[in-house]
Amino acid sequence: MGKAMIIGAGGVAGVAAHKCCQNPDVFEEICIASRTLEKCEALKAKLDGGKTKVSVAQVDADNVEMLSGLIKEYKPDIVMNLALPYQDLSIMDACLAAGVHYLDTANYEPPDTAKFEYSHQWAYRDRFKNAGLTAVLGSGFDPGVTGVFSAYAAKHHFDEISRIDILDANAGDHGYPFATNFNPEINIREVTANGSYFEDGKFIEVPPMSVKREYDFPEIGRKDMYLLHHEELESLALNIKGIKRIRFFMTFSQSYLNHLTVLQNVGMTSIEPIMYEGRPIVPLQFLKAVLPDPASLGPRTKGKTNIGCIFKGIKDGQEKDYYLYNVCDHQQCYREVGSQAISYTTGVPAMIGAMMVLTGKWQKPGVYNVEEFDPDPFMAELNRCGLPWQESFAPKTVE
C-alpha cells in the first residue's frame, strides 16, 4: 500500500513503528529517522523479521535542506512527525519541498516561548492545498482521539454540541518520587503555563493549577484534576458546531504538584538561559537531563489511564449527555510493544492517522485538524488496534 517515514525514535515513535509493522498490508515499508542513529537501529532490531521492511537514517529535523533531501531519496508517501513540537515547521517545509503528505501529534511550540497555538501551522494551509498535499495536525490522543471523539459525537449523537469537557487521567505508578510520563521539557512547560478555557466565543485565562475538580473515573476511581490550556481547545472551538464552552482537565497527584512547586520556586522550570561556568544553559533542559527518561518507565509502570470527553448538547430538541472514553492498561501496553500507556495512547493514533491518509480515507489537499475528517474509519481502527472506546449516556458531568 505505501511507505512511511517516522521522524523521531523516542517512546511514541517506538509505539507507532511497532503498530505500523502490525499492519503490513498498509505499511509495506517504514524508515525511522532521528538525530541519534543508535536509537533508530535499536528500534529496527526489535522490528526486523516481519513483513514490513524497516530502514533507518540519521537526520537533523531542524535542517530543512538535509531532511527534504532524505525524504526525496527515500520517497515515502507520508512523513510522520513524532519528534519535538519545536520542529513541526521545519518538517512541514521539508514535506512541501519533497512533495509528501505530513502528520504530527502536537502543534508547533516556539523554543523560546512557552505558548503553543495552531496559528503557525494553519498559516501553511494554502501552500499544502496548492501542492495537492494533506497535512494532518494533532493525531495523538489529546489532541487527536479527543478531536475524533468530538467529530463522532457531532455526527452520530447531537444536532448541536454546547459543551465539551476533556478529561485526561493517569492512575499509573512508576515508583519514582518525581518523573514525567512524556518529554519532561514539554510536560513541565505545559503544566506551568496559565490555564485557559473557551466560553461564549473567547478564551479565558486562569493562573496555573488554580481550577481543581474531582472526578470518579470508570476503572480507576476518584482523582483530583486541574484545568489546563490544551491545544485541541483552539481547533474544536472553530470546528464543532454550536459550541459554547470547552475545558481540558488533567489529573495530578499531590506528590507531583509538591515536587513541581519546589522546582519552580528554585528556578529549575525556567526556559530563560542562565550563565554557568562561562556558558549558557537552560534550567528546564538541565532538569530534563537529570530526570528519568520517559522511555525507561515502561517496565516500572502499573495501573491504567482513562482519557475521554463528556459532551452536552441537543438531539431532536432534547438535552443530551454523552461520555466517550478509553481505558488503557500500562502493563498490557508494555507486554505488547515495550512501552507505557502514555506513549501507547499517542503512538497508536499517530499510526491510525497515517493509515487514514495512505488508504485515501483522509486525503484532501490542505492543513487540517483531525476533527475535520470523517471519524468513523478512525473509530473502527481504534477498536481493532488496541485502544477500544467505551460510551455512556448518563455521565456524571463536571460542574
Image (cartoon, helix red, strand yellow):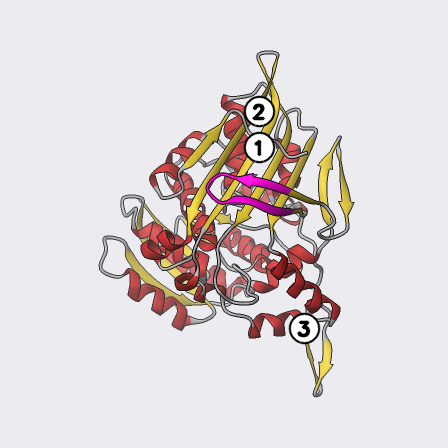
Give the residue number, with chain letter if any, for mark 2: 321
- The dot on residue 310 is 1
Q: CA distance from mark 2 to mark 3?
A: 45 Å
Query: Which label lies toward us, 2 or 3?
Result: 2
Question: Which secondary structure type mostly characterizes the magenta part of the structure?
Answer: strand
Badge 2 or badge 3: first in the primary sequence: 3
Callouts 2 and 1 close, C-beta under 8 Å: yes
Compare residues 30 and 273 and report the one nearer the observer. Answer: 273
| In the image, residue 218 lies in the stretch drawn in magenta | yes
Give the residue number, with chain letter if any, for mark 3: 283
The reply to whether residue 369 is in sight is: no
Badge 2 or badge 1: first in the primary sequence: 1
Near mark 3 (Cα within 10 A), the count class, few <14, some 14-19 or many ≥20, is some
Q: Position of residue 347 (x, y in %)?
A: 44, 51
Q: CA distance from mark 2 to mark 1?
A: 7 Å
Q: Does dot 2 land on a helix, a strand or a loop?
A: strand
220 relative to 76 in the view: left or right: right
Badge 3 or badge 1: first in the primary sequence: 3
| In the image, residue 284 lies in the stretch drawn in magenta | no
Residue drawn 49% across and 37% down?
325
Q: Position of residue 272 (x, y in %)?
A: 73, 70
Q: Does dot 1 land on a helix, a strand or a loop?
A: strand
Q: Residue furthest bottom?
A: 277
Q: Quadrant of residue 41?
A: bottom left
Which amino acid type corresponds to the residue marked 2 in the rendered image?
Asp
Near mark 2 (Cα within 10 A), the count class, few <14, some 14-19 or many ≥20, is many
Which amino acid type corresponds to the residue marked 1 in the rendered image?
Ile
Residue drawn 57% across and 24% down?
321
The reply to whether residue 158 is in sight is: yes
Q: Please provide the residue range marked out in magenta.
A: 214-225
Residue drawn 58% across and 70% down?
288
Residue drawn 53% across and 25% down?
394
